[in-house]
Amino acid sequence: MLSAEDLTALWVTLQLAAVSTVLLLLLATPLAWWLSQTAVRGRVLVEALVTLPLVLPPTVLGFYLLLLLGPEGAVGGTLERIGVGHLAFSFSGLVVGSMVYSLPFVVQPLQNAFAATGARLFDVAATLRASPLDRFLTIALPLARRGYLTAAVLAFAHTLGEFGVIIMLGGNIPGETRVASIAIYNHVESLDYGAAHALALTLVVLSLSLLTLVYAVNRRARVVGVPG
Amino acid sequence: MTIEARFALQQGGFRLDVDLTLPGEGVTVIYGSSGAGKSTLLRCVAGLERAAQGALSVNGAEWQREGLFLPVHRRPLGVVFQEASLFPHLSGAGNLRYGLQRTPAHERRIAWDEVVQLLDIAPLLARYPQTFSGGERQRIALARALLASPQLLLLDEPLAALDEARKAEILPFLEQLRARFAVPMLYVTHSLREVARLADYLVLLEAGRVVAQGPLQSVLSRLDLPLAAAEDAGVVIEAEVAEHDTQWHLSRLVFSGGSLWVARCAEPVGSRLRCRVLARDVSLAHERNEQSTIVNLLQADVVELAPTDSPAHVLVRLDANGTSLLARITRHSQARIGVEPGARFWLQIKSVALLR
């Protein structure tokens, strides 16, 4: 069914989705918390910027990331000078690209979850002698756990289906930047519809199982009466 | 032992400007209409309003002054808000433990078992807040605040969100807290009934300023405050149960001004009770009239008179051997029998409400 090359592409895809989801959850947490708590005027601009990847064509995103991360770019050039090497056409570059691409899918559920808890519970925790970090860890995080589940699944699934950003930024290097969506595109280009089918169906089944699992977990949580 | 609080805070068009010296024990009620700044004052004391300028010391410990602002979590206090605000992801017991675990062992003065028993919350400990009634939530919130062994307990309209039956359920617990734990309380309310039942000391707040403050009885009997002009103006008397009359099902209460008969109460002889005497239930007579259905007769001297909200009535403050009483009478009667300062009268008290 799936060739060794296709399996490699699938493996790269899963690795990419897993790594960028974990990193995104870590990095988006302080951003989402700040957005949910601040009343600063500049907030709206930050919110607009965070949402931008949602509306921009992925090719536009990929194009600017290529310029930024490539050997001549501000980030890529700097990395080149300190001997790390630029990020275009590398797995690390794809991770950065995927994180930008899926940013709104993580920040928004987290921000909503934090905001839904409301200031009163944090005030109460403070009067019960909990420091700010303590309040965040013992009140904000546990009450936002559904937000985290949603954010993780959306980011993972969204990255599985990424195409435009990758083709601009990562090209087509087997085992490094060739992900499943690009492999499917290659199969169709060479009119090998059978291979395209096998890989496409795998992605469908994978995404569907993932979402089903999440909904099942969510529902069980509700039935047991654990609040959210 | 005092609580000294001086705050200035500008919030949009509202300005809070208070300078208070409050007793460091018992229940101080902050009373005022909505928008008077009661909750804001409480938030300042708690340290939840960082913008507030001023100074605060609680029984010798400085919490705030120029150049010092103890953050909320460093102030040994407990707060109960109008909405119980329980942590929904923790069980009843988990909520109670939250503050307890964060209180250093040497500061813990209030025992788990005592609180659980007093507030009758043992059946709630294993359950989650979503299944609690409004009254149950407030009891857990109270217990949670107490178990952090606060040096000051702040209560922000803790009964306002409850219906009458739930209020009646919680009030006795609050009275017991006052009796059992030596924790000073600041209690915000706009209910005169809660004032009468709980307050030892009363602060009247209006538009961000203190209009009057003092021991409960003295503030309630002042004629120059809006409280006195109201139709349900009255005084609160602290009295002791002197005897029970089993034949007529009555109990006799004694206080400095004499004694009052009330419907038989359950409290044993010697216990202290609060009762409320409304100004409109008190009438004056020159002679002691035994030939009437009114059994409660006290002798008192007229101290002063003041107008009321009705042009037909006048409010009279009398002194019965140290206890102030108010009487609301018509101007016509006042002129007819000569109610003037210094004159001595017999008070006929039609009704005495036990507060509990």
Image (cartoon, helix red, strand yellow):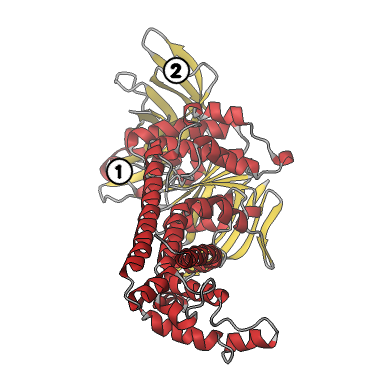
Question: As displayed, is residue B196 above or below residue A103?
Answer: above
Labelled disc at residue A74: none
Report the quarter where the N terminus of chain A lies: bottom left
Measured from the top left, where is residue B257 in percent x and y?
Answer: 49, 29
B273, A148: nearer the viewer = A148
Residue B44 percent location from the top left of the image: 55, 59
Question: Observer-nearest residue: B155 or B332?
Answer: B155
Amino acid bearing label 1: Ala
Q: Which residue is mark 2?
A: B266
Amino acid at the residue labelled 2: Ala
The residue to which callout 1 is attached is B335
Q: Quadrant of residue B110?
A: top right
Mark 1: which secondary structure?
helix
Q: Is residue A18 visible?
A: yes
**Mark 1 / mark 2, whichever is N-terminal:** 2
Task: Determine which quarter of the picture holds residue A74.
Answer: bottom right
Alpha-carbon span between mark 1 and mark 2: 42 Å
Q: Nearer the viewer, residue B186 or B302?
A: B186
The relative height of residue B222 versus residue B10 in the rendered view (above or below) is above
**Quadrant housing residue B1:** top right
Tag 2 subunit: B
Mark 1 or mark 2, which is nearer to you?
Answer: 2
